[in-house]
């Protein structure tokens, strides 16, 4: 059975959350006649699987399956998060362009540094001042304007001529100093760039994490039934971190490597001429296997990730159910379970790593071949006296740089691919369609005046299991409705529909004549004080639990709520009173104590409609009597829906509904139902007999 702790007692206020209008419930073409669109859309894994199917068929994604790392909207959103860092990012970009320029300068400097050495033996003709002047005055004429490279060629000529007028020894010193300086600048640049981009990416991750959490708070309970918390956890943590790394990798490594490749190739072309064509061809060919492997890495990473979320799942389950684990002596079982999923992750990781490592030799080999080919060609040129040794040397170095950058690019690209699959999962969650959303023209309820009613309500959690069928009732303000019935008959579900945790399949739930789907969720839930069947407390003090989500409450207000819930005495008997820490999920309290704190928590809000789901079920007979008195008091000031376990507690309710398998089978007051002699009367007599026996 599904743990009901996760389905009850969850209260996610949607205050200030962004509004989404589409509930995404349109049936999907081609999805088969029995597929329930709601079921598909609420389950993240299913959404992703469906999307993969659609993509394979190369069809246009239907709007309800949108929200992927390939969706431009996702990148627009990322860019919008990055907007505040525009300046920083452009600085970083300029810096990486600058670094690449410095690289080119490095090659020139090297050529200049080596020139005197290579020429040392041969006779050298230094240009005279007139020759120099003649060259400096060289400018492209009108006829040269069509050729974009002409000004560069001129510049080169001019610089070369100026440089050759400097005496060799000074040349050597200048070039050596320049070289060192360039490396220093390059490294400084890299450091600043990395720091900037790391900061920006961490900020974006932080913003996204909050956005994800805010999204999670908007999503309906149905979503949480379909998606294990472990899976959600891994998206908000591991996937997001990976996405952040992706940003850094892209923005720092990718850009600077691309710039370096361009700059170095430019130098190769400039110094080595048409050879750039071969180099470009090699670069192009190299990227084909890289892309292929990258795609496969991404697929594998996806599989690994599914396994990683199993690790989270197993971990969170074992940690939150320690009592059961220990009671059943299941430590070994849990350990084995964990070991298995953990091993699977390791296995997957190794596979992707081996794929990744396979790209490296490919690129290396391509690089080595291109460099060797160039050495052959260039060496010949030098031997034939058509080219200078120092140029060959620098160009080879530049080519090696290109190869190194390409290798890093290949690595970045595979990392990028696997980062994309994380981005995909983050995007799916970010764009998950919330089922319960305000309509654009939703009205805000200004209070509760007349009645709560159900009109022929049908409801199901899953496609094939009707839970409520044709439920109707009207509860006037100030009255008490009691719902009784066997476990699993649908009582709690009625309460959930009043709070609009789910939308009905047909019929309507109305408050003061407004369909709950036409009013704002916030104003609707503001009218309700709820005590859920499973009482869940939060880590913190008793005080903060009673004042949950209402931090401005005074001590007097908290105490009066606690008194009304008959909790004050036991709280005061605790060593720290209201400051007592309740432990994770309230585990340090007994069930009855937890329930009374939950009742106090519901009361402090002073909401007009009280929804008590078996609020006295966890209490012993004595405290039940106390709480019952409290509830009786409260009922006088409230409109109440009481889901009752013990029938003695609802004798004087204005209306009693008996529910069997989701249908109202009997309705009326206690007396009326006792007269009918049906299920209710039977239940009362059984409980009465038990009571007599137990007292
Ligand atoms: N989140 C859920 N997903 C699927 N089925 C559910 C869910 N919650 C309750 N149900 C099913 O709906 C039926 C009614 O549940 P509920 O309203 O909690 O019954 P009651 O409160 O009367 O014991 C049960 O059969 C239960 O198994
Ligand atoms: Mg119930």
Image (spheres, rainbow, N blue to C red):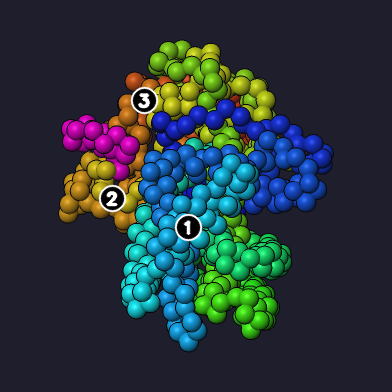
Vertical side of 211 occupied by 253: above or below: below
Vertical placement of residue 482 versus 334, above or below? above
Mark 3 or 1, nearer chain start: 1
Residue interval drawn in magenta: 545-563
Residue 507 locus on image (x, y percent): 65, 22
Q: Residues within 10 Å of mark 1 (few under 14, many from 20)?
A: some
Q: Which badge, 2 or 3, is on the more N-terminal residue?
A: 2
Nearer-N-terminus badge (1/2):
1
Give the CA separation, mark 2 to mark 3.
24 Å
- Residue 400 falls inside the magenta stretch: no
Q: Which mark is residue 135?
A: 1
Taking the image as shown, residue 165 lies to the left or right of residue 571, namely right
Q: Does the image show residue 226?
A: no
The residue wearing badge 3 is 607
**Residue 467 occupies quadrant:** top right
Residue drawn at 20 percent across, 45 percent down = 578
Cβ of mark 3 under 8 Å from ligand 2: the answer is: no
> Label 2, on which residue?
540
């Amino acid at each position: 059975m599904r743990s009901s702790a996760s389905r009850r007692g969850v209260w996610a206020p949607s205050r200030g959350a962004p509004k989404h209008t589409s509930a995404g419930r349109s049936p999907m073409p081609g999805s088969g006649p029995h597929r329930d669109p709601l079921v598909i859309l609420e389950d993240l894994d299913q959404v992703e699987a469906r999307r993969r199917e659609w993509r394979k068929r190369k069809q246009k994604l239907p709007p309800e399956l949108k929200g992927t790392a390939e969706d431009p909207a996702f990148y627009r959103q990322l860019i919008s998060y990055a907007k505040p860092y525009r300046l920083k990012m452009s600085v970083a970009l300029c810096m990486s362009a600058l670094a690449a320029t410095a690289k080119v300068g490095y090659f020139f400097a090297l050529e200049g540094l080596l020139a005197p050495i290579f020429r040392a033996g041969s006779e050298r003709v230094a240009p005279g001042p007139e020759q120099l002047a003649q060259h400096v005055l060289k400018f492209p004429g009108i006829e040269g304007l069509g050729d974009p490279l002409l000004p560069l060629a001129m510049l080169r000529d001019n610089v070369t001529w100026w440089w050759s007028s400097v005496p060799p020894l000074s040349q050597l010193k200048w070039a050596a100093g320049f070289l060192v300086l360039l490396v220093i600048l390059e490294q400084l640049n890299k450091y600043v760039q990395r720091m900037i981009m790391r900061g920006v990416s961490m900020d974006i991750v932080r913003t996204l994490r909050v956005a994800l959490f805010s999204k999670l708070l908007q999503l309906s309970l149905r979503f949480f039934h379909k998606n294990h918390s472990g899976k959600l956890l891994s998206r908000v943590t591991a996937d997001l971190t990976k996405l952040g790394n992706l940003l850094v990798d892209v923005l720092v490594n990718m850009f600077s490597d691309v710039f370096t490749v361009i700059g170095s190739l430019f130098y190769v072309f400039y110094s080595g001429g048409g050879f750039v064509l071969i180099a470009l061809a090699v670069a192009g060919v190299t990227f084909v296997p890289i892309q292929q492997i990258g795609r496969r890495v991404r697929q594998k990473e996806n599989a690994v990730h599914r396994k990683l979320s199993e690790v989270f799942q197993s971990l969170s389950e074992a940690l939150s159910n320690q009592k059961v684990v220990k009671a059943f002596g299941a430590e070994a079982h849990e350990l084995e379970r964990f070991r298995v999923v953990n091993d699977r992750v390791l296995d997957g990781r190794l596979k992707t790593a081996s794929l990744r490592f396979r790209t490296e030799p490919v690129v290396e080999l391509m690089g080595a071949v291109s460099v060797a080919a160039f050495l052959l060609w260039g060496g010949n040129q030098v031997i034939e006296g058509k080219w200078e040794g120092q140029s060959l040397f620098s160009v080879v170095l530049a080519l090696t740089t290109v190869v190194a950058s390409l290798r890093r690019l290949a690595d970045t690209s595979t990392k990028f691919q696997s980062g994309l699959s994380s981005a995909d999962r983050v995007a799916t969650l970010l764009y998950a369609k919330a089922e319960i959303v305000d309509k654009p023209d939703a009205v805000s309820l200004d209070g509760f005046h007349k009645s709560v009613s159900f009109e022929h309500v049908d409801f199901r959690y899953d496609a094939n299991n009707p839970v409520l069928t044709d439920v109707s009732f009207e509860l006037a303000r100030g009255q008490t409705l009691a719902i009784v019935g066997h476990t699993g008959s649908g009582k709690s579900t009625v309460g959930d529909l009043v709070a609009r945790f789910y939308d009905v399949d047909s019929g309507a739930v109305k408050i003061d004549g407004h369909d709950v789907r036409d009013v704002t969720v916030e104003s609707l839930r503001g009218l309700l004080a709820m005590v859920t069947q499973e009482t869940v407390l939060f880590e913190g003090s008793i005080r903060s639990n009673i004042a949950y989500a209402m931090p401005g409450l005074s001590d007097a207000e908290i105490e009066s709520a606690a008194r009304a819930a008959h909790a004050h005495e036991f709280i005061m008997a605790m060593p720290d009173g209201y400051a007592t820490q309740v432990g994770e999920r309230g585990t340090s309290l007994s069930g009855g104590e937890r329930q009374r704190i939950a009742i106090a928590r519901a009361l402090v809000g002073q909401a007009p409609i009280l929804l008590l789901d078996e609020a006295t079920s966890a209490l012993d007979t004595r405290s039940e009597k106390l709480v019952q008195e409290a509830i009786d008091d409260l009922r006088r000031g409230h409109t109440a829906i009481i889901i009752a376990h013990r029938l003695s507690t609802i004798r004087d309710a204005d209306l009693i509904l008996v529910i069997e398998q989701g249908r109202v089978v009997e309705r009326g007051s206690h007396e009326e139902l006792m007269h009918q002699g049906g299920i209710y009367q039977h239940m009362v007599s059984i409980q009465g007999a038990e009571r007599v026996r137990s007292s």
